[in-house]
Every structure is written in structure tokens, then in C-alpha cells.
Amino acid sequence: MATTHFLVLPTSNEVFSWHGVETKSNQIISQHKNLRLALDKAKWLNVESAATALEREARNGKPRCGYVDDRYPHPWGAGPRSLT
């Protein structure tokens, strides 16, 4: 399950009653008069964050070299570094 990075918190502000907050930095991302809009924004941000994390994992999990062959004991970049 994806981690939630954005939450909606109430405020004491009469104009903007709800804040969208980024949980790691405790930074206010957005301000809203309407709770439904605040929740929609937080949900959208969490979906985007999860999608970005999946893309990053997929990118980091692939070898940097496009050539991989079972005949060689070490894939590109994983073998010994010595050229002697």
C-alpha cells in the first residue's frame, strides 16, 4: 500500500478553513474554504506521489546497460572493476 504524503487539517482561519499539508516537511501545500475540495486535492496529490514512486522504482530496478546475457557471470556494472 502506498504511503500517504498529504493530509487535510482544519485551521482557525475563517476564510480558509482547511489546509493541505505535506506530512514529511509539515509544509502547507494548499488552502481551501471547502472540505470536499481539500480532500480531493489531497487525494490527487497522494495518487500522483504514488505513481511517481512506482515510476522511480521501475526505473531504478532496471539495469543501466541494455545488454544482458546469461553467458556472462556479471551483468553490466555488477562485475569486478579491475581492468588488469
Image (cartoon, rainbow, N blue to C red):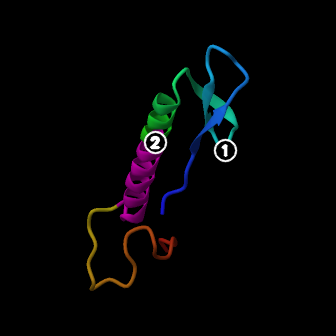
Q: Is residue 33 above or below residue 4?
A: above
The tag on residue 74 is none
Horizontal placement of 29 versus 49: left or right?
A: right
Q: In the figure, is residue 6 to the left or right of 66?
A: right
Question: Where does the image place residue 47, in percent across and percent down from the top left?
Answer: 42, 46
Q: What x and y, as percent, mark residue 75? A: 37, 75
> Magenta span covers which residues?
45-64
> Is residue 70 located in the magenta-colored stretch of the structure?
no
Q: What residue is shown at x 43% (from left), y 59% (from top)?
A: 57
Secondary structure of the magenta portion, mostly? helix
Q: Which residue corresponds to mark 2?
A: 43
Front position in the image: 61 or 45: 45
Picture residue at 32% right of the left edge, 83% below the top = 72
Q: Which residue is mark 1?
A: 24
Q: From what the image shows, is residue 59 above or below residue 48?
A: below
The residue located at (46%, 29%) in the rendering is 37
Say what amino acid the circle numbered 2 marks: Lys
Question: What SS does tag 1 mark?
Answer: loop
Q: Is residue 60 magenta?
A: yes
